[in-house]
Structure formats: C-alpha cells, structure tokens
Image (tube, rainbow, N blue to C red):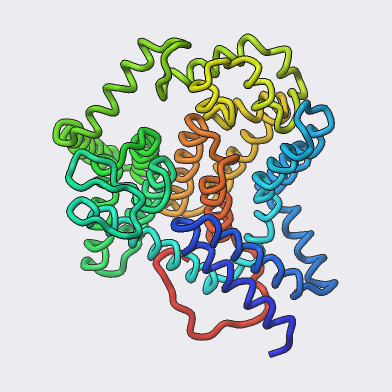
C-alpha cells in the first residue's frame, strides 16, 4: 500500500470515527474531522483533484452549500462586527465547505456502512444511558436527577439530544422495513419505540417533540401514501400513542402546556423560552432597516441585538443568536441568505424524490427535523447541531447517490441495513 492510498483510507476511517464521536463530544469530533481532511488532502493527486471538483460541482446540494459559505464571507465586508467576531462565524459555517469532501470520501458502500454503524452505536449508547439515568446516576451524564418526570439528557443539551434521537428513531424504523428477518425487524422496532419514548418522556426538548412527531408523520406519509388503509391504521395508532404519552408523561404534558401559556402571556419584561423567540420577531420587525436586501452583515446580529435588548436576562438568552436559523441568515445575509438556505433544503428534498421509497422516507424525515430545528434554534450556527446536520446530510446523500466509487478496494467491511 503506497502513501496516497494509506492517506485516503486514514481519511475515511477518521471520518467514520467522527460519526461515533459527534453525538458524544464536539471537541473530539472536530479533532477527527481535521485529521480526516488533512489525510484527504495528502491523498490527492492531480487526477483526484479534478475528479473531486467535477463531481462536487455537479451535485445539486453542494452548489447552495458553497454559495452560502461564499455569501457569509462577502457579507463580512459590510458588517458592524469586529473581525474577531466575524472569524468566529467563519468557524461555525466552515462545515458547509466540508460537505463535498465528506460526500466524496463516502462514495463506497463499505465506508458508509462503518459510518452508519458508528452513529448507530453512539446513539444506542446515548439511549441506554438515558433510560439507565432514570434509576442510576451515571458518571458521564450531564443531568443529575433520577426518576420519571425529569430531564435525563446525557451528553449534550436537551435540544441536540432530542433532534439526534428523533433521526435515530426514524433510522430504526427504516432498518426495520429493510430487515431480512422478523427478529431483526422486531429488534429495530423495540429500539425505535424506546427512542421515541425517551424523547417524549425522558427529555424536556420541545424541539425534539416536534421534530420526532413531524419526522414520523413525514416518514409514514412517504412510505404508505399509496396504501391509505394501512396509513390510516398507522395514524390511529400514532395518535393513541401520542395521547398516552401526553397523559402519562408529566414532563411532556407540562412542557407542552407551558409553551402555550408562554406564547399567550409573553412580554418584554418576563423571560420565557417561547416569549423570547416572539420578542426576536418583534426586534426583526423594528429593525428591517438593518436587514435590507443584502442583510446587515455576517456576525451583525449580536452587535445590533445588544443595542436593543437592554434587560441583561433577555440579552443573555437572545443576543448571542435569535434561536431561528432562517431569521439569522435573513438578518445577516439578507434575502440571498434566506433563499440559499431554503435552496439547500429543497435540493435535499429533490434528491430524496429520485430514490427508492424507504431511503426517500428517511431523507424527507431528516429534512423535516432540520426544518423544525432551524425554526426553533440557530442549528447551523451552533456547533453540535451543525455537525449533526452537515455530517448526516453528507451520509444520507452519499447513501442515496449513484456516484462512481473511489478506486481502492476494501475487503471484509461490515454491512448494515442502510449503507
């Protein structure tokens, strides 16, 4: 094995480790991504470079991702923020530039299998830890509270765990449909049920609640829309399960009712989760002059928000980011930024529609989680969530694609139901 092939394999296996690391540790995942990119660069020759550029530019999802990254740089030149603050934003949106690299490295089915396995094991460990945390205080759990009716987030904040677990539930439903035996299918259904219950009962993420429910609805509609009787049965069973969760889970019931109360009684003098988001919309309406056609500039939102939100508690919650990625792009990069992020998501949907039903259902479920998360959080700006969305976009698109594989063979790779 020559050095170029060694570097390529090292890049791919480092990337596989990233999929096992990012549900657990941002720092470890970032380090492994850096290692993967460095090895990939070392493996390139002139032919590989031309092949990478040709295949990347031809992919319909890569174009809006690269255009959005370019717009972030261009919008820096009319921003009121300091260059130190702007460079912080560059680091957050850098992953858009890494998307084509990850997709290129994952051209081989065997390599994607390692990534699915790594992500599945990391999420399975998170799921088991969440349930065990109900009865035992685990040393690696970030929450210190036992019993039902409490939040049992393990490694991340409750929003990140909620959206990642929502995709893991959809992924297990997908694997159940593709399983080659009833016992394997039953195992996937059990994991999916435990995962869904953990989101609704064992965490306090309302983003996770909505993401889980919307993704499963989208998955069911995509898979069963030609079989209305079966779809109706799934909807009825899902409605009964949701009703049971609402009545049996104090946490789910309380957080849902609290969201309605916060929306009805919000004010600028009382800090609440939903109320703060509504105040951001008011802020946007009053500062449209700072969000013209080309936006106020990269990293401008916290600068301008600090001049508007005088209350320290409100500013601490809202000034770093508006808890809505679409608002953040529109405010800072203007109408082009909003159009590009919507183009990025629509491009994933269009790619999903080209492929077989089960994978299409999974990809559309993923997009529904992405939309939900970015409507309630600045998910492409936040480290953990942006890792999740960019990496899973790369893996799902590579798994759906029909791209020519990389030349070097891999023997003895482990296969998973989705690769």
Query: Eyeballing the image, is 17 above or below 328?
Result: below
> Image check: 70 left or right of 372?
right
Comparing 344 with 233, the one in front is 344
Quadrant location of the N terminus? Answer: bottom right
**Observer-nearest of 99 and 132:** 132
Q: What residue appears at the point 47 percent right and 43 percent down from the top-left corner? A: 364
In this view, 181 is above or below 220: below
Quadrant of the image occupied by residue 124: bottom left
- Residue at image point 38% right, 36% down: 214
Q: Residue at x 52, y 29 (%)?
A: 323
From the viewer's perspective, is 115 left or right of 199?
right
Towards the viewer: 59 or 316 = 316
Q: Quadrant of residue 32?
A: bottom right
Q: Is residue 60 visible?
A: no
Residue 11 seen in the current view? yes
* Residue 179 location (% of width, % of height): 31, 65
Residue visible at 71% across and 51% down?
97
Whole-percent x and y of residue 102? 63, 61
């Amino acid at each position: 094995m020559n050095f170029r092939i060694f570097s390529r394999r090292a890049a791919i296996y480092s990337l596989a480790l990233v999929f096992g690391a990012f549900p657990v540790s941002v720092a470890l995942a970032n380090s492994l991504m850096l290692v993967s990119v460095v090895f990939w660069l070392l493996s390139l020759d002139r032919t590989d470079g031309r092949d990478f550029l040709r295949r990347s530019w031809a992919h319909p999802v890569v174009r809006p991702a690269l255009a959005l990254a370019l717009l972030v740089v261009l919008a820096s030149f009319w921003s009121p923020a300091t260059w130190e603050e702007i460079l912080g934003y560059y680091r957050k949106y850098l992953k858009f530039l890494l998307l084509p690299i990850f997709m290129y490295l994952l051209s081989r089915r065997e390599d994607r299998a390692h990534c699915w396995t790594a992500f599945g094991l990391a999420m399975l460990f998170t799921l088991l830890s969440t349930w065990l945390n109900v009865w035992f205080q685990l040393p690696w759990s970030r929450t210190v509270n036992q019993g039902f009716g409490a939040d049992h987030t393990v490694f991340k904040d409750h929003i990140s765990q909620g959206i990642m677990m929502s995709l893991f539930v959809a992924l297990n439903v997908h694997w159940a449909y593709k399983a080659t035996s009833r016992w394997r299918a039953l195992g996937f259904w059990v994991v999916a049920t435990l995962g869904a219950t953990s989101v609704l009962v064992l965490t306090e993420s309302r983003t996770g609640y909505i993401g889980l429910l919307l993704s499963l609805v989208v998955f069911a509609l995509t898979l069963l829309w030609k079989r209305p009787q079966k779809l109706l049965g799934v909807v009825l069973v899902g409605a009964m399960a949701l009703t049971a969760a609402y009545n049996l889970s104090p946490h789910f019931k309380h957080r849902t009712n609290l969201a309605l109360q916060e929306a009805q009684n919000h004010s600028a003098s009382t800090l609440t989760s939903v109320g703060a988001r509504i105040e951001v919309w008011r802020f946007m309406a009053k500062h449209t002059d700072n969000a013209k056609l080309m936006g106020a500039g990269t990293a401008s939102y916290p600068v301008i928000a600090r001049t508007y939100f005088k209350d320290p508690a409100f500013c601490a919650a809202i000034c770093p980011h508006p808890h809505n990625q679409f608002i953040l792009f529109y405010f800072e990069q203007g109408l082009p930024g909003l159009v590009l992020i919507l183009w990025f998501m629509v491009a994933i949907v269009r790619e999903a529609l080209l492929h077989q039903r089960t994978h299409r259902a999974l990809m559309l479920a993923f997009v529904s989680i992405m939309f939900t998360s970015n409507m309630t959080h600045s998910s492409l700006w936040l480290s953990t969530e942006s890792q999740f969305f960019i990496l899973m976009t790369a893996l799902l698109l590579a798994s759906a694609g029909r791209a020519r594989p990389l030349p070097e063979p891999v023997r003895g790779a482990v296969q998973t139901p989705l690769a």
